[in-house]
Amino acid sequence: MITGTAVATVVYNLRQRHPTLDMPVIDYDLALLFQPMLVLGISIGVAFNVIFADWMITVLLIILFIGMSAKAFLKGVETWKKETITKVEAAKRLELDRNGDQAEEFKCEPENLSNTTPKETKEPVKSEVSILKNIYWKELGLLVAVWVIVLALQIAKNYTATCSVLYWALNFLQIPVAGGVSAYEAVALYKGRRTIASKGDVGTNWRPHQLVFYCACGITAGVVGGLLGLGGGFILGPLFLELGIPPQVSSATATFAMTFSASMSVVEYYLLKRFPVPYALYFFAVSTIAAFVGQHVVRKLINILGRASIIIFTLSLTIFVSALSLGGIGLAKMVQRIDRKEYMGFDSICSYT
């Protein structure tokens, strides 16, 4: 279901542009920093899903989702207030223009003094372009390469004896593959060869401890996503907002990264024989249609109301509802297992063949 939603959303966003800058709404450099670590964390999280008891996963899900929902909601309120201030200032400027003060404002703005020729007037940023113009092929190629290599290692691992030397060797080979790409991006960001362009001018200065921390956050998001079967996007979205990424870009980039991680989770759970195919295909179809409709409706609302904070409130509500529904189902199953006096401790991953 998560994979279907992510794929549909990415297909929709491939034509969209950044709300204020001349770049795609998907920030490929941001994805390059986080996605390899996310995929690596997914492998660890899936293994933890096998080891941890169901009640542990349920409790973790409830705590994490409620905390993230509250954090996202507070961020949405903050963004709403900023948008209100911006709309008030825009209304005041419009009123001044109507009163004939436009020429005087022009004199007071230094940036306009150097842009007096018609040729230098900036064109409005387009909201949609062709998909080919919006894809950065080098970055996409690196992301796909990480996904393919890690997936190949997972498939190869499935044909080895569980917990054998080769089994663990294939597991640990994922670290240099994923870590190498994220390290490449981190070094490029630190040295200024690349930038997180969606942040504008503030996306150019990065310190080593920041980059290490963000990579660690990517692994953590992957571990939690793999453990709970969510793909990690619910965690990356709020994290990107905290980094100062615009809501539209935050949502699009998190979903883009989640497409790789969620599909990886699907394959790994299938290899572990914990994946009901007909059930999953039904929800894949439903979630794909719902994602296209949701993206279209939300974008229309943003255009009408002029408030990107709608995305943040939608994310917060989705996480909160997920906490109630998934947590409620998990608690109900936990009570049933307690009544039947079933074993509710840790399991061994070596017991799965």
Image (cartoon, grey):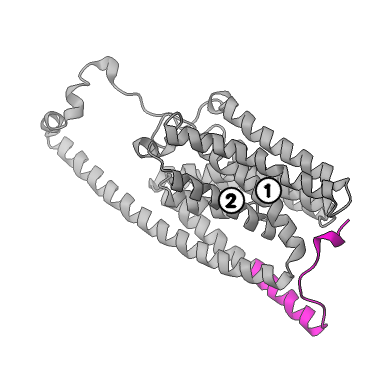
**Residue in the image at 73% along x and 61% along y:** 49
Q: Does the magenta stretch include residue 345?
A: yes
Q: Is the magenta stretch mostly helix, strand or loop?
A: helix
Give me the C-alpha separation between circle 1 and circle 2: 9 Å
Vertical order, 151 against 44 (above or below): above
Mark 2 residue type: Gly
Residue that protrudes farthest toward the front in the picture: 165
- Drawn side of residue 264 relative to residue 160, left or right: left
Q: Where is residue 176 in the image (x, y as percent from the top left)?
A: 66, 40
Q: Mark 1 points at which residue?
A: 262
Q: Does the magenta stretch include residue 214?
A: no
- Drawn side of residue 49 relative to residue 121, left or right: right
Label 1, residues with CA under 10 Å away: few <14, some 14-19, many ≥20: many
- Drawn side of residue 26 relative to residue 290, left or right: left
Task: Inspect this view and state whether residue 292 appears.
Answer: no
**Residue in the image at 15% along x and 39% along y:** 96
Vertical order, 139 against 218 (above or below): above
Residue stretch rendered in magenta on the structure:
326-353
Q: Position of residue 220 (x, y in %)?
A: 59, 55
Secondary structure of the residue carrying numbered label 2: helix
Secondary structure of the residue carrying numbered label 1: helix
Disc nearer the start of the sequence (1/2): 2
Q: Are marks 1 and 2 in contact (CB under 8 Å)?
A: yes
Q: Where is residue 147 in the image (x, y as percent from the top left)?
A: 69, 38
Q: Mark 2 points at which residue?
A: 233
Quadrant of the image containing the C terminus: bottom right
Q: Where is residue 280 in the image (x, y as percent from the top left)?
A: 78, 53
**Residue in the image at 83% along x and 82% along y:** 340
